[in-house]
Image (cartoon, grey):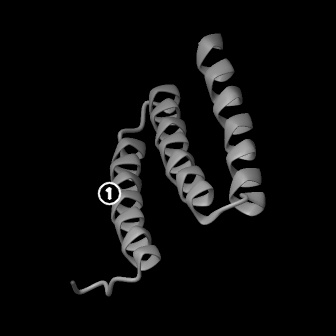
Amino acid sequence: MMLLEIFLFILINLSIFCLYRIIRGPSIADRMVAIDILGIIVVGITVILSIKTGKGFFIDIGFAWMILSFIGTLALAKYLTGAKLDE
């Protein structure tokens, strides 16, 4: 189980770097990529927590986070191109 703690520690540190890129990103595209990567990291953290605790609902939280992150990325991309969300 020591390996899971190492992976969790690495993912938490990577999320800090992503938060830095979201705040200080030189462009909107960099911030958008950092938000996507942060979503992937959060899903990884929920999977590790699910394995570590044996609770299956963390996997459900990860799936919900993935779907919301994908929809949010699509909405942000449409907004940045100047298109309306209903097009």
Query: Which residue extends farthest left?
Result: 87
Q: Is residue 34 left or right of residue 73?
A: right
Q: Nearer the viewer, residue 58 or 15?
A: 15
- From the image, tell me which residue sits under label 1: 67
* Residue 34 position in % (x across, y down): 59, 51
**Is 83 above or below relative to 10?**
below
Residue at 41 percent across and 75 percent down: it is: 81
Q: Nearer the viewer, residue 53 or 19?
A: 19
* Residue 3 position in % (x across, y down): 61, 12
Q: Quadrant of residue 35?
A: bottom right
Q: Is residue 29 left or right of residue 54?
A: right
Q: Nearer the viewer, residue 7 or 77?
A: 77
Residue at 54 percent across and 40 percent down: it is: 41
* Residue 45 position in % (x across, y down): 54, 38
In the picture, the quarter occupied by the N terminus is: top right
Query: Which residue extends farthest top?
Result: 2
In the picture, the quarter occupied by the C terminus is: bottom left
**Is 63 above or below relative to 3?**
below
